[in-house]
Image (cartoon, rainbow, N blue to C red):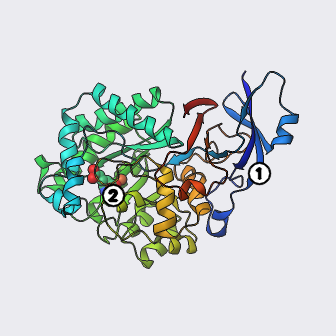
Amino acid sequence: MKTFAVLHASQLVTLAGAARPRIGPEMRELRIIENGGMLVRDEVIVATGTSDEIARNVPADAELIDAAGRVVLPGFVDAHAHPVFAGNRVDEFEMRALGKSYEEIAAAGGGIRSTVRKTRAATEAELEQQALKHLQRFVACGTTTVEAKSGYGLSVEDELKILRVIRSVAARSSLEIVPTFLGAHAVPPEFEGDLQRYAALVIDEMLPLVAAEGLAEYCDIFCERGYFDVGTAGRILGAAKNHGLALRMHVDQLTNYGGAALAAQLGAATADHLEQTEADGIAALKRANVQPVLLPGSVYALGKTRYPRAREMIDAGLAVVLATDFNPGSSPTPSIPMVLSLAATQMKMSPAEAVTSATVNAACSLNRVDKIGSLEPGKLANFSIFDCNDYRELAYYFGIPQTHAVYVRGVEAFRA
Ligand code: NIG
Ligand code: FE
């Protein structure tokens, strides 16, 4: 049995409180302990308190971690990411800089399809190696749990290949990974013009295999003009539900397409993106208690200006989540601190609301709030130590690494 204590944190940001999504003014209550301490036994937090309280009860043989002059937070929970793919899309990044839009590039055969071509050609070992490299960068930014979607295979064989890669990197990475099946990410070229035939492949062949092998907890879909319409999305997700998968959805990213209402109707865990969602969509999400997952990194990286209406969502009582959307096309960042910065500057979320969105609320959206998302006795010792005195500096000093060390289940996963 290994016991250690973290002492003298300038702020121990606990987010202690009920094991449920935080809404409205609760999102600003971080339950910070100044000059804080925390006692960890094996992989679990045993106590939090002032550094003096914790120091008084530390066993003689315990290791001590001095966090003086540093902030300690729960490990970030990134509830929306696409970390398994081959290659990158740096050429499209340059094309956008020179004036082309994401939609124009996709219509010309680039976009998701270009990553699908490369990912199909890659072996499991190659995908694994690239994914592990990306995942270590998430850890370096203070993240300890990452949701991982498939979606760059779009054939039975290649979707299963990606999900198996997700499973094997989950076993090899220090991070906790939550797998999501996104076979309905785009219609692959061999099904061009025959959406229904591809939907049938997803429903009749992919979903039963994914469920039988236990390869995913969630099913996701890209509900968007030119991708999956509301009716087809409803059928695919209904089938996923019948296989016991919970639902997440990409909705209203490029156009206001009715996806938020569908997420509400299906009782999805989350509706993600929502850049184009208006008041009616927000009201529908609230009626069904669907959590919005906001992805400002994708708005920023696509050079767009319309961010989701986070303030209205918070005022409506929605339990907002923030995530990176890490992927090669629209959001090549694994950095939650960057997302916190965008949330503050572009969506007028307070730094405290942003931290709540990327920790405890994100943990709720992944059905894991009993184990992660806050620093409280009984929860896993997943935490990050940052080189600043005040948690707000994480979003304020954007674009620089401030991570000092990261622990997952009580084990050091990163040190600067
Ligand atoms: O979340 N919107 C759909 N999927 C991704 C983009 C994927 C890509 O361009 O490769 C997203 O933004
Ligand atoms: Fe996404």
Within 8 Å: ligand 1 and the Cβ of disc 2?
A: no
In this orientation, does residue 269 appear? no
Specify which label sits upstream in the sequence, 1 or 2: 1
Q: Amino acid at mark 2?
A: Ala
Which element is circle 1 on? strand
- Mark 2 neighbour density, 10 Å: few (under 14) some (14–19) many (20 or more): some
Which element is circle 2 on? helix
Within 8 Å: ligand 2 and the Cβ of disc 1?
A: no
- Mark 1 neighbour density, 10 Å: few (under 14) some (14–19) many (20 or more): some
Would you name the residue on which mark 2 appears? 301
The residue positioned 55% from the left and 48% from the top of the image is 367
The residue positioned 59% from the left and 36% from the top of the image is 405
Would you name the residue on which mark 1 appears? 34
In space, the residues marked 1 and 2 are separated at their CA atoms by 36 Å
Q: Is residue 62 above or below residue 246?
A: above
Residue 141 screen position, x and y as percent: 50, 43
The residue positioned 72% from the left and 41% from the top of the image is 68
Quadrant of the rendering where the N terminus is positioned: top right
